Amino acid sequence: MSRDAATAGRGSAVWDPAQYGVFGDQRGRAFGELIARIPAEAPGRVADLGCGSGELTVMLAERWPRARIEGLDGSPEMIAAAPAHPRVRFAVGDVRGWTSERPVDVIVSNAVLQWVPDHDDLLARWAALLAPGGSLAFQVPGNYDAPSHALLRDLCRSDRWRDRLGDALVWRPVRDAAGYFEVLAGLGCEVDAWETTYLHVLPGDDAVLEWVKGTALRPVLAGLGEEDSGEFLTEYGALLRDAYPQGPHGTVFPFRRIFVVARRPPP
């Protein structure tokens, strides 16, 4: 899902739950496939760190009907849009500072860590908070070098925009599945790591632009006024149309994602 960087993985951008919800089914697919691989039958305590607007967090309550679930996100706008659920407690907070006084059975973090530079130490802290037999499950986009992101970086650093946007993008390249395996296996975890490239077929005009408006563009738009945002989007949209031409069935948008489920060995 969406998540936070300087104040929980997303920077100072204002996040828009409605815009993030565009193409919600496609975005949510990775979350479902991640939690399907978590080897937990009846966890008591579950944390969703970087929970966004919370719709996917509720899926955790549906899967584990005895669990008490904590949802944390750095965006007040996202948390304000979270649905009410009797076993889910949502809060605004920084995932980098999150801790727990008691061991946690499952920690989930969906599309967050790409906003947190140098997050190996954070993974180690989260793994240390797991109960014996507990699982840490996370998913990150692996499309840093895709045209959608490469074009955005280049445009931000162009002569027209670099004075205002040269440092707007705070996300960094993530590890591949093998890299995360080495990190978490080195902490003594049993690790299931894999990668998937989805071919999202997006309907409508300027579909890829609409997709990135909900995620990668948020810190960029936060640095621009309304008039300049319109100019930037016009320029970026034209580049995206060339890179991802609309076809008879929609716009094909390849999207690579990296998945990890790390389990602390049982006693």
Image: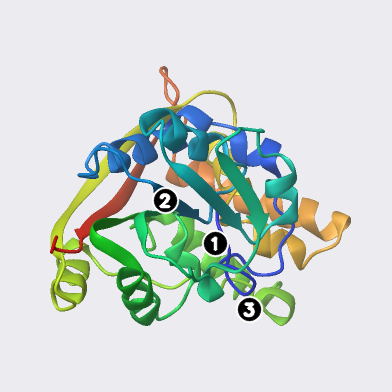
Q: Position of residue 249 (x, y in %)?
A: 41, 18
Q: Are marks 2 and 3 in contact (CB under 8 Å)?
A: no
Q: Position of residue 16 (x, y in %)?
A: 71, 45
Label 2, label 1: how far apart the Cα atoms are: 39 Å
Front residue of this view, candidates 67 and 222 = 67
Q: Quadrant of residue 179?
A: bottom left
Q: Please name the residue that numbered disc 3 is placed on.
A: 166
- Give the mark nearer the N terminus: 2 vs 1: 2
Front residue of this view, candidates 64 and 37 = 64
Element type at marker 3? Answer: loop
Q: Check disc 3 and give the amino acid type.
A: Gly
Q: Is residue 175 left or right of residue 6?
A: left
- The structure residue drawn at horizontal position 30% and vertical position 70%, both measured from the top left corner, is 127
- Give the mark nearer the N terminus: 3 vs 1: 1
Label 2, label 3: how far apart the Cα atoms are: 41 Å
Q: Please name the residue that numbered disc 2 is placed on.
A: 45
Q: Is residue 27 above or below residue 192?
A: above
Q: Quadrant of residue 28?
A: top left
Residue 152 badge: 1
- The reply to whether residue 177 is visible in this rendering is yes
- The structure residue drawn at horizontal position 26% and vertical position 44%, both measured from the top left corner, is 197
